Image (cartoon, rainbow, N blue to C red):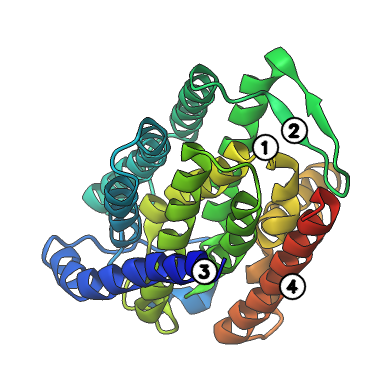
């Protein structure tokens, strides 16, 4: 186990070093290509100063993850499927960001087109898993029980992956928030994979998760307040696809709400706000997603992000220890 832990640290370090090496060069390139952030008019007034900050920094998070995962896993079929899926979500975000940059306004891919592409990517992943012999079962949290959902598996995977991808996207609204929360939340998913039945697929997932923790930390170095670069949809949609895919390959889909509690809260705040406003024309929160509500209450970005990190860390510890206890490890 000590040898494994040492190797796992190496994977994180590989992601960290690759990110730290890439981002200074990438930020310069993004500035040269005028890939700059367009701030939404309906967003917080305090964010107007961020107009023009380089975006699409997700390239520096995801590309090293894909390359290192394939290299470490020796281009196994399982690693190819994982990387292809994350790449699909990455390209959806990349195209969305590219359209916004070219138009000079917050008008990228149409939401329906984006949703369809996310669903198709998820379906391909689910079919690929079944072809490789992955069982359509779900691990019931806080038990050692698994249920077979049969034909419902593919639709369920599409819902989970699409929902998670968009949830991470909603969380990407403050400097350092999405990258920090994702890095912390990935810990629990990697732990669950490490203590599941060993296979080429779980190994590929562990490698991808650990390298991504490293690249997210390296991105946080440049994205912490005041941000020098934003990840854009290029990063957030891909991170959501990666996060959910690691849960799926371990049959831990139902543990996702616990591991990614911040993503859940961000999404719920939007759903509650929209639903309540349609019925009453009144708002529950000052602004959503909920991190903007706290901004409106007068909290600084750094304090909000740090407190969300704390919640994510507690959630990661709770999820990991609960999973290990109920699985008998």
Looking at the image, is 112 positioned above or below residue 182? above
Of all residues shown, which one is farthest toward the left? 32
**Which of disc 3 and disc 2 is earlier in sequence?**
3
Q: Nearer the viewer, mark 3 or mark 1?
A: 3
* Distance (Cα) linking label 3 and label 1: 23 Å
**Which of disc 2 and disc 1 is earlier in sequence?**
2
The structure residue drawn at horizontal position 81% and vertical position 27%, both measured from the top left corner, is 147
* Distance (Cα) linking label 3 and label 4: 21 Å
As helix, strand or loop, the secondary structure at mark 4 comes to: helix
Q: Nearer the viewer, mark 2 or mark 4?
A: 2
Q: Position of residue 259 (x, y in %)?
A: 69, 57
Mark 4 — residue? 314
Contact, CB < 8 Å: mark 1 with mark 2? yes
* Distance (Cα) linking label 1 and label 4: 22 Å
As helix, strand or loop, the secondary structure at mark 2 comes to: strand
Mark 3 — residue? 5
The structure residue drawn at horizontal position 61% and vertical position 38%, both measured from the top left corner, is 248
Q: Position of residue 176 (x, y in %)?
A: 48, 74
Looking at the image, is 22 positioned above or below residue 97? below
* Distance (Cα) linking label 2 and label 3: 27 Å
Mark 2 — residue? 138
Q: Nearer the viewer, mark 3 or mark 4?
A: 3
How packed mark 3 is, by other alpha carbons closer than 10 Å (few <14, some 14-19, many 20 or more), is few
Q: Position of residue 327 (x, y in %)?
A: 80, 49
| Quadrant into which the C terminus falls | bottom right
């Amino acid at each position: 186990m000590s040898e494994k832990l040492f190797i796992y640290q190496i994977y994180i370090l590989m992601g960290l070093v690759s990110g730290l090496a890439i981002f200074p060069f990438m930020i310069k390139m993004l500035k040269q290509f005028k890939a700059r952030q367009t701030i939404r008019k309906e967003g917080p007034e305090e964010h107007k100063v961020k107009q023009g900050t380089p975006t699409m920094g997700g390239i520096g998070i995801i590309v090293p993850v894909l390359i290192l995962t394939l290299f470490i896993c020796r281009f196994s079929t399982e690693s190819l499927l994982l990387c292809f899926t994350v790449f699909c979500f990455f390209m959806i975000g990349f195209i969305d960001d590219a359209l916004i940059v070219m138009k000079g306004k917050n008008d990228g891919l149409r939401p329906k087109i984006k949703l369809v592409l996310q669903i198709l990517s998820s379906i391909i992943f689910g079919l690929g898993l079944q072809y490789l012999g992955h069982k359509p079962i779900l691990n019931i949290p806080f038990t050692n029980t698994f249920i077979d959902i049969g034909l419902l598996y593919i639709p369920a995977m599409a819902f989970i992956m699409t929902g998670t991808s968009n949830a991470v996207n909603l969380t990407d609204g403050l400097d350092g928030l999405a990258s920090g929360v994702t890095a912390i939340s990935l810990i629990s998913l990697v732990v669950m994979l490490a203590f599941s039945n060993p296979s080429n697929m779980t190994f590929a997932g562990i490698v991808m998760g650990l390298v991504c923790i490293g690249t997210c930390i390296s991105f946080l170095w440049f994205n912490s307040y005041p941000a020098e670069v934003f990840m854009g949809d290029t990063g957030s949609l891909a991170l959501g696809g990666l996060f959910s895919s690691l849960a799926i390959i371990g049959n831990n889909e139902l543990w996702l709400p616990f591991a990614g509690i911040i993503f859940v809260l961000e999404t719920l705040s939007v759903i509650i706000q929209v639903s309540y406003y349609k019925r009453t024309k009144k708002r529950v929160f000052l602004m959503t997603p909920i991190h903007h509500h706290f901004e409106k209450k007068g909290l600084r970005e750094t304090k909000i992000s740090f407190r969300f990190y704390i919640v994510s860390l507690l959630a990661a510890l709770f999820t990991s220890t609960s999973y290990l206890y109920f699985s008998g490890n």
